[in-house]
């Protein structure tokens, strides 16, 4: 039994009970997955010059939540990122948000998700500019994960960045040494202040009361970048519920 099988079998019942709670993106995703490799009007045609045989195959939907499509997309993304890796050590920085903000973020996802990247990137660049062992231009790759391993809604950002910086004036790369890059408590404080300020001015909505003063940011050395990229890719192009996790219906 696969997720697509369950969706096709119970689609009418799903819409009857929960159709009013689904947004347009969810309806479009369901429609795409229902037609994945099923719509005979959309096919790829193949011809063999040696034996003159022709064959057709239904097209995949390509939706980012479709379990049938995303293995190839994940492999392509991973290959592109691996070609960019430098022969240096890498750090992974993880920015999280407190539980009290999650409902607001989920309701305003299209606006807030880009905001998370913008704020986190500005924090990393400013910290790098002030650090004596860097003081140059840093590069990084950022990925949004929207759920925890327990499949609870838990938006957080992972950034992997090489341990060093590029100095455009001297055209030189300065390598950072050691297992420590940034103070996580300082990162968390600046991340909290900047994100709340941007949320307050962009959304024009009251922020939840009783939020924690201390937010959580991690910054750990991960060695060469390839293992970190593989970890990120596993959760990048797939739905929350993979087929292998389905026990019974």
Image (cartoon, helix red, strand yellow):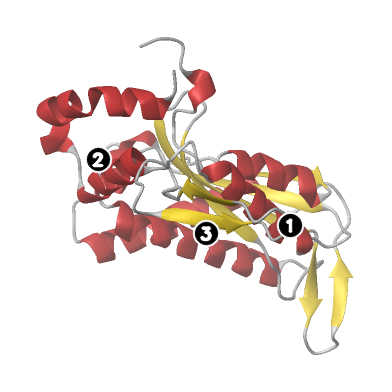
Whether pointer 3 and pointer 1 mark residues with C-beta atoms closer than 8 Å, the reply is: no
Q: Is residue 233 visible?
A: yes
Q: Is residue 142 left or right of residue 180?
A: left
Q: Is residue 96 above or below residue 52?
A: above
Q: Earlier in the sequence, mark 2 or mark 3?
A: 3
Measuring 75% from the left and 73% from the top, which residue is drawn there?
A: 135
Sequence-wise first label, 3 or 1: 1
Whether residue 220 is visible to the viewer of this picture, yes or no, is no
Question: At 66% from the left edge and 62% from the top edge, which residue is drawn?
Answer: 140
Furthest residue in direction top, as rendered: 248
* Element assignment for label 1: loop
12 sits left or right of 174 in the view: left
**Marks 2 and 3 close (CB-CB < 8 Å):** no
**Label 1: how many Cα within 10 Å (few below 14, some 14–19, many 20+):** few
Residue located 86% across and 71% down the image = 174
The numbered mark at residue 120 is 3
Q: Residue 84 shows which numbered tag?
A: none
For discs 2 and 3, the disc positioned in front in the rendered view: 3
The quarter of the picture where the N terminus appears is top left
> Which residue corresponds to mark 1?
50
Q: Nearer the viewer, residue 121 or 70?
A: 70
Q: Position of residue 43 (x, y in %)?
A: 44, 53
**x 87%, y 51%: residue:** 178
Q: Which quadrant of the figure has residue 88?
A: bottom right
Q: Are marks 1 and 2 in contact (CB under 8 Å)?
A: no
Nearer the viewer's eye, disc 3 or disc 1? 1
- The residue under label 2 is 209
The image quadrant of residue 213 is: top left
Residue 10 versus residue 97: which sits nearer the camera?
10
Instruction: Please indicate whether residue 95 sits to the left or right of residue 232 in the image.
Output: left
Gap between marks 3 and 1 measured at Cα: 55 Å
């Amino acid at each position: 039994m696969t997720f697509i099988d369950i969706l096709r079998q119970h689609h009418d019942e799903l819409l009857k009970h929960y159709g009013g709670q689904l947004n347009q993106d969810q309806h479009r995703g369901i429609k795409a997955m229902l037609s994945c490799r099923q719509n005979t009007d959309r096919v790829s045609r193949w011809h063999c010059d040696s034996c003159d045989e022709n064959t057709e195959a239904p097209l995949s939907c390509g939706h980012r939540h479709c379990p049938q499509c995303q293995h190839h997309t994940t492999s392509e993304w991973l290959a592109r990122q691996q070609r960019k890796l430098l022969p240096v050590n890498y750090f992974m920085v993880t920015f999280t948000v407190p539980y009290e903000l999650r409902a607001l973020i989920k309701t305003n996802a299209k606006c807030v998700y880009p905001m998370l990247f913008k704020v986190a990137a500005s924090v990393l660049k400013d910290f790098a500019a002030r650090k004596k062992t860097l003081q140059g231009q840093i590069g990084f790759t950022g990925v949004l994960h929207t759920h925890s391993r327990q499949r609870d809604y838990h938006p957080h950002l992972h950034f992997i960045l090489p341990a060093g910086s590029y100095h455009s004036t001297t055209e030189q790369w300065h390598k950072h040494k050691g297992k420590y890059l940034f103070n996580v408590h300082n990162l968390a404080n600046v991340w909290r202040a900047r994100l709340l300020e941007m949320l307050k001015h962009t959304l024009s909505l009251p922020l939840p009361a009783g939020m924690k003063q201390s937010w959580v940011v991690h910054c750990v050395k991960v060695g060469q970048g390839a293992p970190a990229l593989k970890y990120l890719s596993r959760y990048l192009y797939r739905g929350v519920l993979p087929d292998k996790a389905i026990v019974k219906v």
